Image: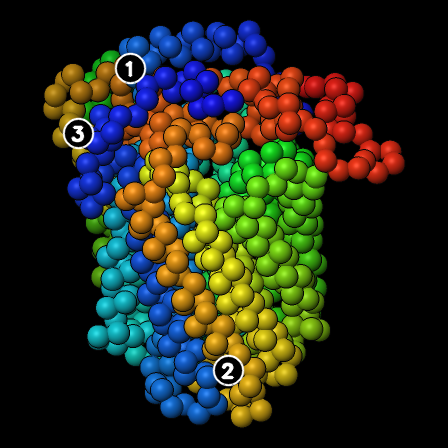
Amino acid sequence: MQGSTIDPAKTALNYHHETEAAAHHEEHPDHRLFGLLVFLGAESMIFAGLFLAYLTFRVVAPVWPPEGTPERELLVPGINTLILISSSFVIHQADVAVKKNNVNGLRTWFLATAVMGAIFLAGQVYEYNNLEFGLKTNLYASTFYVLTGFHGLHVFLGLCLILAVLWRSRNKEHYSGEHHFGVEAAELYWHFVDVIWIVLFFLLYIL
Amino acid sequence: MTQAEWQSTTTPTTEGAIPGQRKWQDYFTFNTDHKVIGIQYLVTSFIFYMIGGALATAIRTELATPESDLVSPELYNNLLTVHGTVMIFLWIIPAGSGLANYLIPLMVGARDMAFPKMNALAFWMVPPAGLALIGSFFLEAPQAGWTSYPPLSLMTGKVGEGIWIFTLLVLGTSSILGAINFFVTILRMRVPSMGINDMPLFCWSMLAASALILIGTPVLAGALILLAFDLLAGTAFFNPTGGGDPIVYQHMFWFYSHPAVYIMILPLFGAISDILPVHARKPIFGYRAIAYSSLAISFLGLIVWAHHMFTSGTPAWLRMFFMITTMVIAVPTGIKVFGWLATIWGGKIQLNSAMLFAMGFISMFVIGGISGVMVAAVPFDIHVHDTYFIVAHLHYVLFGGSVFGIYSAIYHWFPKMTGRMMNEPLGIVHFVLTFIGMNLTFMPMHELGLLGMNRRIALYDPKFATLNLVCTIGTYILAVSTLPFLANAGWSWISGKKAGNNPWRALTFEWMTTSPPAIENFEQLPVLTSGPYDYGLSKRNPQMEPEESRSNVEAPPGFIPPEEARAGSPEP
């Protein structure tokens, strides 16, 4: 290979490190957080694709929303948005707590987030039940249900992650200041779901 | 240099039950060892390749005569759809994943992938999805083509189309999970002595291909979800009668499926870049140019998709944009091709099966690449769109490119995977038959396309009959060409000549362990002492043979040998 050298000093040092590590059967370094970020990057591409499809439908259509689409109520989704956004701050407190080895704090804040997530989902179900259009009414209605439904599925998954962390944290030893990947993963996923909702809310309700 | 001189491989392999080797049962169960998964991928995808090949043979037999006499037009559509889907999603993409699974951890000096369980999960999604697709023949096979454009795909049978969507969603998920693993392993799990510019080129190309999978596949999933709603729930996202827009599906589909072409070819670009220097006993020409051109292809590959849609009512300014980006992508690809040619130029070439297939790869891929530049031009494409010219082009890229590359990689890494050499005469017979069969099958299709024969039809004008018969004969040769390979692989696996650790005297890490490698790959993690391609460079490669450093080409005036050129330029 051209254009690079191998520093002999560095190599020797690494060799030494390597032999020692092999002798102790080195502990595997943790790549899970990086892996999760890559996964969320891929996941956000599904939403990007769906959002762009929605925008294209919107731009191409002569009238948007198509004629006869009933007015939407903004109160429930507005409250829902506020709940979801503030839940991101709530779940961050859990992260702060666990980094200080405060497992009880972690449990409290995660429970609060789970309740807020459940309220969000209940709010969405309530909204679905009170809408005057169905999945097949027109193109706007279809995109509305598929986008919010697909996001709702992600909220549900995030809620499951939070509940799983709560379940595991019954054992006080499970999470500590040093070992709390599960907490970080659930938190990161929750923030992701939150950010997606903000874009979604803007596209579907405000724009 | 003999294998024994490699420090890191001091333990000799013993006969019989080798300690540290997997039991045969492990290859049939959920196993997290990347080498087991790699072989599972390769064998599974090869089985699907033979199924796809059987479908292709049926298609060509039908097309031997202008009348629709062997199969009904509906069955012809089924064959065509499943052939395309199987070859792309169940053969070339998983075969690339198989090579990547087997090679990446070995090449970067890791003991396994970053996420072994997820890796096994990704593999085990492939067989059920594939069986569902093949099994659809007993229920109702999809018949809207591998592109499945609506509204056609919404009108040709719910069951078949539903199975097709299900298959693709599962395979897409599998592909994404695999790509996360490749991406993280390459970026985070190299031995400390290996900088990113010391990686074997296969890792570079897999990095680029994984990025494409991670960006593109989710968008296809989005399109398929909407298509599934149209099909099963009666929405009208892509159905013009309900106010939807089928063009949106085409954009979303090709946003993945054009990069998919690079997902299918980039792993083999990487494999070829690793194979050529070994068998030409020369350093790769332009390591960084080849490495970074993979990234350039990856980036450009994301902004060329609408060249599949020149005749879909795409506005002129947009066609212009996509025409230019498509032509620009020939530049990084050309950089690679010239890099490979310069690598073998003046090399001490060993014309073994791996090298023959590698050189076949370059020559066939260049033909496909050049016809690619032709169809990138809007005025030309409008005439050949949906004709056999496109069929010829895509098969030169995917068969002459990807399949030749996979064969080359198998011949090259078979000794590492099994510990045994493949039979060379049989390998050469395989190459000759494949090369003749492929050109006989696909070369006349250029002519057929230019004469105006449409693709995807069971019946055609009798004036095309002669050339079609030639194509069909070529297909039979191709079908037969698989036999020497199967015999060779099967026989060599059981009782081939023992390969030793490093039969090709290669310098990359995978050759610095036993063949096949032990469960955690390395007795002791290897240390980088030379670059991956320092063949014939005495300063950096202590095991160099003096024979290799001698040039056997007359230097043109003004030519500076690489050795001196490097000495003259300050190294970073």
Q: Is residue B247 left or right of residue B516?
A: right
Whether discs 3 and 2 lie on one chain: the answer is no
Q: Are marks 3 and 1 in contact (CB under 8 Å)?
A: no
Q: Residue at x 35, y 70 (%)?
A: B54
N-term mark: 3 or 1: 1
Q: Secondary structure at mark 3?
A: helix
Toward the viewer: A109 or B241?
B241
- Residue drawn at x 38%, y 20% is B9
Provide residue B492's location: percent of width, then percent of height: 34, 46
Q: In this orientation, does residue B476 appear?
A: yes
Mark 1 — residue?
A25
* Residue B167 at x, y percent in the picture: 30, 61
Camera-side mark, 3 or 1: 1
Q: CA distance from mark 2 to mark 1?
A: 62 Å
Q: Is residue B168 above or below residue B442?
A: above
Residue placed most toward the observer, A10 or B357: B357
In this figure, which residue is indicated by the disc labeled 2?
B469
Q: Residue at x 54, y 91 (%)?
A: B461
Q: Secondary structure at mark 1?
A: loop
SS assignment at label 2: helix
Q: Is residue A118 visible?
A: no
Read off the chain for label 3.
Answer: A
**Circles 2 and 1 in contact, beta carbons < 8 Å:** no
Q: For residue A166, which numbered disc appears in the image?
A: 3
Residue B179: x and y, percent? 41, 42
Q: Are marks 2 and 1 on the same chain?
A: no
User: Chain for mark 1?
Assistant: A
